[in-house]
Image: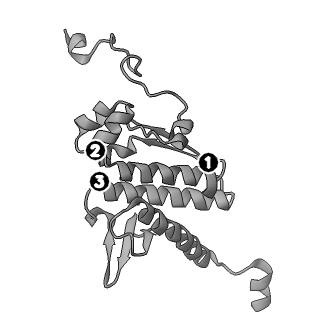
Amino acid sequence: MTGLEQSIGADDSGARLLSTMNNISMHMSGYIEALGGEFGQYPVRLDLHHLTVAIDRPGRPIFMQRTGGAENHLAYHLAALLALHRYATSQNQPLPRFLLIDQPTQVYFPSEVAYKAAGGSIEKTEQDADLEAVRRLFELLDRFARVEAPGFQIIVTEHANLRNDWFQKALVERPWTKPPALVPEDWPDLAELAD
C-alpha cells in the first residue's frame, strides 16, 4: 500500500489548507496591528467554520462581531482581504489582482455630514478626520500595492484627501467637488420625478 500511496500521492489537502490559512493569518495580524485595530497584539485568523475573523486571545477567541465599532470592523475586513490577495498573488493563484474599496475612511470622521463635507478638500480632511488613522490606512494600501503585491491595483473612491506627496501622486483624478461632480447638479431628483 505504501508504494501505491507514494506513486499517486497521499491526500495532503488538510495539511495544505492549514498551511495556507496559517500564512494568511500571519499577514492578517500584521495588517490589523498596522491599522491600529483593537486586539492587534493577539493572533488573528479566518475562522472557516463560522465564516468570520477570530482573534485568539488567551482563554477563548473573540469573533469579529464582538470587537467593537466600525474602525475595528474596517481593520479586520481589510486585513482579511489584503492577506487573501497577498497569498493569492505570491502563489500565482487565479484571483483578480485588484481591489475596489468605497469610502473606507468614513469610519474615521465624527459624522457622515463631516465626511461628505470633506469633499476632496485637504483642509477639511485635516480638520475633521482622525488624521493619523486615515494616514495609516492609505500608507498600508500604498505599501501593499508597491511592495507586498507588486502589480496589484487598489482603486479607492474617497472624500478624504491627504497633502502628502505620495498620496497626491497616487490620485488618478483631481477630487470631484461641486462642480464638477459624478452626478450633475441639474439631474432631476426623486421628488421632481414623483410630480
Residue 170, given in percent of the width and then of the height, sits at 55, 38
Quadrant of the snapshot with the N terminus: bottom right
Q: Is label 1 or label 2 in front?
A: 2
Instruction: Looking at the picture, tell me which residue is in the foreground, 137 or 26.
Output: 137
Instruction: Write down the residue under mark 2.
Output: 109
Using the image, tell me which numbered label, if any, was put on residue 70: 3
What amino acid type should be assigned to the residue bearing mark 1?
Phe
Using the image, tell me which numbered label, if any, was put on residue 152: 1
Q: Is residue 102 above or below residue 86?
A: above
Residue 37, given in percent of the width and then of the height, sits at 36, 63
Tell whether 114 sits left or right of 174. Answer: left
Q: Residues within 10 Å of mark 1 (few under 14, many from 20)?
A: some
Quadrant of the snapshot with the C terminus: top left
What amino acid type should be assigned to the residue bearing mark 2?
Phe
- Residue at 77 percent across and 78 percent down: it is 8
Spatial distance from mark 1 to mark 3, Cα to Cα?
A: 26 Å
Residue 184, given in percent of the width and then of the height, sits at 37, 15
Spatial distance from mark 1 to mark 2, Cα to Cα?
A: 28 Å
What amino acid type should be assigned to the residue bearing mark 3?
Ala
Identify the image quadrant of residue 40: bottom left
Identify the image quadrant of residue 192: top left
Instruction: Looking at the picture, tell me which residue is in the foreground, 64 or 179.
Output: 179
Give the mark, 1 or 2, whose residue is nearer the N terminus.
2
Q: Is label 2 or label 3 in front?
A: 2
Q: Residues within 10 Å of mark 2 (few under 14, many from 20)?
A: many
The coloring applied to the image is: one colour
Instruction: Looking at the picture, tell me which residue is in the foreground, 52 or 40.
Output: 40
Instruction: Looking at the picture, tell me which residue is in the foreground, 82 or 93.
Output: 82
Residue 183, given in percent of the width and then of the height, sits at 38, 19
Q: Is residue 76 above or below residue 26?
A: above
Tell whether 15 sits left or right of 68. Answer: right
Number of disc labels = 3
